Amino acid sequence: SSPPSKQLVFEQYIIPMSRLADMGDLKMKLQNVSGIPANRFRVCKKEDIVTGCGEGDNISTLSYTRVSALPDKDGPCVKLIQQSSMDDITSPMIAEIVAFELTLNLRPSIQVPEDSAISSSEVSNAEEANVEESTADEMSDDSIDDVNGEEQHKLLEKTAREILKVYGDEEECAVFDTNPTPLSKYVSRSLWPKTAKEFKLGLRVDAYDQRNHWFPGSVIEIINETEGDVTNGEKNDDAAPNIKVRVHFDNFSSKWDEVHSIDSFNNGRVCPLYSHASPRSKPTEFVVHHRSIDRASKKYHLFGQSFYLQCHNEWSTARAGAHVLAQASRFLESSRFLSAENGKSTASNSKIADRERQESQKVIASIVEELIKHDKNYIESAIASREDGKNKENQTTFDAAAMSAVLSHNLSKVLPLLPFDVRVTTADSPLGTNKEETPFPFSLVRTIGNYMNARHSLVLHWRERPESVTNFKLSKKHVADVPRQLLYVPPFVVAHKQSHDMLNKSVKSDGTPKIVKRHPSSAHGGMHIGVCLTEFCKEQQLDATDCWRCPVCKVNREGKQSMTLWNLPDLLTFHLKRFNASSRWREKITTKVDFPLTGLNMRQWCDPESPLCEENDNESFIYDLVGVVNHYGGMTGGHYVATCKATPCTSDGSEEIAYSFNGAGINELDTIEEGSTTSGWRLNRSKDKDISSNAAAKAASKSSEPLWLQFDDDLVEPLPPRNVVSETAYVLFYRRRRMHPANIAKYSSLD
């Protein structure tokens, strides 16, 4: 009824959806019930895994919730259902998904469109016009103003300075997450080198790759190579160094790195950021796992609720690290669950845990403030160096490596106080088994979009902190009783009231779906054909898109429609709906429909006012099955196999139509004598196979039940009656037990 509270981490909704409804429809319904725009959702499959690791007093570590992002491309909702429950549509099918709201909250006043490089449309239009006019061959080694045009540079400078007024303020990371793309572009031009000595670590550039395509990248290493100048057979130690830089491209592995000299900067093979390449429209995204070490096995194990996190591509890893810590602090809220014996938490345990969580949140807040302060100082210093460069008298030195080293020194004192370590690992190995795991770099000279790619994920490795117990005034006995536990708190889930009421109607108290009541004679399992007939004949409300047009007033009106049977034929055919389709998607329905071989009573679905219902004899409503057409395959192709009931024949082979089987008699078929030919049973089959079919026919003929034959192309063989009912049944043929005399004469062979 109202948007979720900002204090809640998880809110639970129950949304009814059609099997073939679009995922886009699901997002729109989520938007309606939650108040969150559909384009801010990251929809994921959810899988709860019992790890069996952890301690009994720390129940949050005993299970792990794995999430896997669904593709942005729309698809049918049936893909969300577990394969084991897809075939049964007689009960509500429940698919658990997690829709994460994007962790980025842009500033309204300077919000950057997804398809734009900077926040000002005027600047964006000027840049697009300039990109068409500038190429690598036309680049000169003059000033940056000449490279990009004086007018464009002024617009970019104006936008960057407007953003810098709010970037890094008290609302940064707490309320808003500023997109620094315009700042990164301006800093790239401010630090642009004219000589090799002016190379700066972390400089953002556009560069040619090995295939002569433009990609954004960063200078990750400055290489000093001394030229091999040899004089009189001896190496000249005073030779001028040859300074080069290593450029690492965004979203690529290090094997694609390129080494460039100042010549590449001067001849246009390396240009300022986004001069030719385009910014990525989507932010950098990765999954974050919670991990700890099991005391018994001494091995890592995953636990808790994993989640997706987004970062602006041009954020430094320091600013991105602040965003990671801010999101991680959600798992340090006060405990809302009972973890001790008998469902009651001890006072000392609760007091210590809550106090440590509060202290940890204060540490995170101080680290976030430190990271944002240094990140803003880095950008301001980079921009100031350009202004100082114009004024030779007051020129200052901008040393990015030194600034990053100062930040690392300050963080080394406070990061150990966190209840977890932040580590980078590969997405397919969050346990760190492939030995590619590294600590997360809180650096100013590397952007998160350049450092992380789709192969990476983050791990919050939680540590136990028993040493803090001594901070409380507890007796030695109480201290010994306090368990060593993690400070992780699972997210508190609140059920949406209207959704909770809907869930109670379709789910039992133990969480299993309520089963639709089936017909009492559903002996073969599946859904009885009576359920299908009842659904077919029930009254339906016509919606606004399918109105009834009144023949008198000629106005479309909403109405109701229903169908009942007025008359029954001697031969009754049922065509089961095995194929379901929407405007975009289709599927084959493989639900098993149980239908009786004998004694199907159709009175229930006939109109009470029909002439048939005036008769007291039920024989007019009783039908026996005589044939089934089965479909094997799917939507793109398949194969049809027929199943028919064999009825007694006269000596000349004429079928006795009047014969009826009431289910209690014995088979009246003559047994097949040994040595008789069976070529009519198996067309074009070998003699060995004919012998096996003869044995099967003899076994079937001795049964007290009617003989059923299966026709599969040229193969005809007997079929046990219990196998007639299957999930492949497509068309059913029933014959009235007491046929009209006219039809008996019509269908019988007359001499």
Image (cartoon, helix red, strand yellow):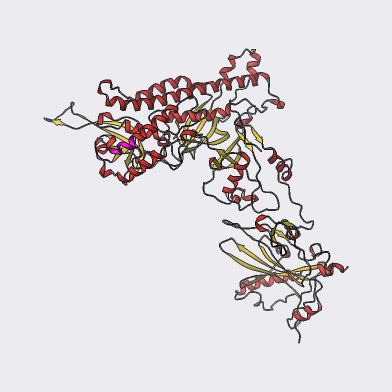
Comparing 670 with 90, the one in front is 90
**In the shown orientation, is residue 617 left or right of residue 42?**
right
Main SS of residues in magenta? helix
Count of marks overlaid on the render: 0
Residue 253 x, y percent position in the rendering: 39, 40
Is 575 situated above or below 431?
below
Kindly tell me whether residue 219 is visible in this rendering.
no
Q: From the image, which quarter does the C terminus lie in?
A: bottom right
Comparing 168 with 213, the one in front is 168
Residue 139 x, y percent position in the rendering: 26, 41
**In the shown orientation, is residue 63 left or right of residue 718?**
left
Seen at 56% across and 18% down, the residue is 467
**In the shown orientation, is residue 5 left or right of residue 278?**
right
Q: From the image, which quarter does the N terminus lie in?
A: top right
Q: Is residue 326 magenta?
A: no
Residue 540 x, y percent position in the rendering: 73, 57
Comparing 66 with 125, the one in front is 125
